[in-house]
């Protein structure tokens, strides 16, 4: 992998395509600390970025890594770091800082088994709630969960767009299986990618307010340090100029702004796949590597005469609430396979109607959920509902 634009079929990994996606999006600064199973991202960028005029820095830990990326972003650099579970935990304070200070930054978190050191070389999906709520306080962010090698590229490009457009930290969450999987990829997508450049202030420096309370679906403008615009950056509650304040009205505006700028553009974040849902009597909700298993299971169930369908969120945060309400409106049987103890299942239950059966399939041993596991659970759910109808 060279980071150059290509035009043919290549066998690449998910981590390879995260690198290609970042470069295609305009990445020029990376700071990180090696950790399995994301280390290949840093290894590749340590060679590629300097050759492209960018900057690669290996930091002393993950806390410093995200701090450096935030600082570089303030100067106008498109910045990223990559990590896995333990490192992502260390980054949470700086994720909150980036949210409060409204600094664009992208984090690749290759999910592995946990908690603590857990299963460094095995897959997990137990960081999905952390991606939304890991840092303290109220804020909103975005997170994407790819299910293929090519989607690692696409979600990374999109993560940079959302980070730059809305001035938020954005996380890409490939699990270990997707990150290390190798697939044929048509690399024309690299040349065809359209990077998004952050919105610039439309006012002269003396009139610029970096934290204006105007909310727009188009995004939020930000000036680059060193380009004639000066403003204060802090993790404290601040007014429109960026300086700390104890005024309750200003504090309220500040805190609601970092929530509402994402909420008002929620539809722009919605990215899902609906597979064979038109007449589905059993709905499977899955994401990441598990969605690949689920799609195979759906096809096998259809062949066995059971009408199954798959609803897959690529964007898991903000959760596609409006679409989910419609998808789940008529649902009576929902199957939720996850490589965790049932984190997204709780989110789904918010949108289900009464009388809907929910079956969870959870693995915490680092191994994959197989199509047979999903099929057996679906058949049991189908049989149980059928028996209830007969009664």
Image (cartoon, helix red, strand yellow):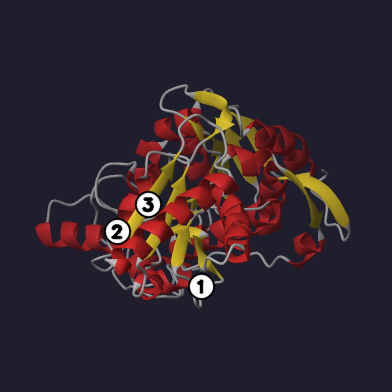
Per the rendering, the mark at residue 266 is: none
> Residue 382: image x %, image y %?
42, 60
Disc 2 from disc 1: Cα separation: 18 Å
Q: Characterize the local packing of mark 3: few (<14), some (14-19) or many (20 or more) Cα atoms within 10 angstroms.
A: some
Q: How many marks do you count on the picture?
A: 3
Which residue is denoted by mark 1 in the rendering?
277
Q: Of callouts 1 and 3, which one flags the residue occurring earlier in the amino acid sequence? A: 1
Q: Residue at x 24, y 62 (%)?
A: 256
Circle 1 — which element? loop
27 lies left or right of 11: left
Q: Characterize the local packing of mark 2: few (<14), some (14-19) or many (20 or more) Cα atoms within 10 angstroms.
A: some
Q: Nearer the viewer, mark 3 or mark 2?
A: 3
Q: Characterize the local packing of mark 1: few (<14), some (14-19) or many (20 or more) Cα atoms within 10 angstroms.
A: some
- Residue 318 shows in this picture: no
- Residue 364 location, quadrant: top left
Q: Residue at x 56, y 41 (%)?
A: 175
Considering every residue shown, the one lying at the far left of the view is 248
Which residue is denoted by mark 2 in the rendering?
349
Q: Of callouts 3 and 2, which one flags the residue occurring earlier in the amino acid sequence? A: 2
322 lies left or right of 190: left
> Residue 187: image x %, image y %?
81, 58
Circle 2 — which element? helix
Circle 3 — which element? strand
Which residue is denoted by mark 3 in the rendering?
359
> Residue 308: image x %, image y %?
51, 65
Q: Residue at x 85, y 51 (%)?
A: 10
> Residue 237: image x %, image y %?
23, 50
């Amino acid at each position: 992998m060279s980071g150059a634009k290509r035009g043919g079929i290549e066998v690449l990994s998910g981590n390879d395509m995260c690198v290609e996606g970042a470069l295609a999006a305009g990445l020029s600064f990376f700071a990180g600390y090696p950790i399995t199973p994301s280390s290949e991202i840093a290894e590749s960028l340590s060679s590629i970025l300097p050759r492209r005029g960018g900057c690669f820095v290996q930091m002393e830990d993950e806390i410093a890594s995200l701090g450096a990326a935030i600082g570089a972003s303030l100067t106008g650099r498109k910045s990223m770091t990559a990590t896995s579970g333990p490192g992502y935990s260390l980054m949470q304070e700086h994720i909150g800082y980036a949210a409060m200070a409204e600094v664009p930054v992208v984090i690749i978190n290759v999910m592995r088994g946990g908690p603590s050191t857990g299963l460094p070389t095995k897959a997990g999906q137990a960081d999905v709630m952390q991606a939304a709520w890991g840092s303290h306080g109220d804020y909103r962010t975005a997170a994407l969960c790819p299910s293929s090698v090519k989607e690692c590229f696409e979600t990374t490009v999109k993560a940079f767009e959302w980070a730059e457009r809305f001035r938020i930290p954005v996380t890409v969450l490939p699990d270990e299986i997707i990150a290390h999987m190798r697939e044929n990829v048509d690399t024309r997508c690299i040349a065809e990618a359209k990077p998004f450049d952050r919105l610039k202030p439309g006012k002269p420096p003396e009139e610029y307010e970096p934290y204006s309370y105007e909310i727009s679906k188009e995004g939020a403008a930000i000036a680059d340090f060193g380009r004639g615009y000066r403003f204060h950056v802090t993790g404290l509650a601040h007014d429109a100029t960026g300086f700390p304040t104890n005024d309750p009205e200003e504090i309220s505006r500040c805190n609601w702004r970092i929530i509402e700028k994402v909420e008002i553009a929620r539809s722009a974040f919605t990215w899902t796949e609906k597979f064979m849902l038109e007449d589905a009597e059993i709905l499977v909700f899955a994401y990441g590597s598990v969605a690949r298993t689920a799609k195979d299971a759906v096809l096998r169930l259809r062949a066995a005469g059971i009408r199954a369908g798959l609803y897959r969120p690529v964007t898991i945060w903000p959760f596609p609430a409006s679409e989910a309400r419609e998808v789940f409106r008529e649902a009576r049987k929902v199957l939720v396979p996850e490589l965790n103890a049932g984190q997204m299942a709780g989110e789904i239950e918010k949108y289900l109607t009464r009388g809907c059966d929910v079956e969870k399939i959870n693995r915490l041993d680092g191994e994959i959920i197989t199509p047979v596991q999903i099929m057996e659970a679906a058949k049991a759910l189908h049989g149980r509902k059928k028996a209830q109808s007969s009664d």
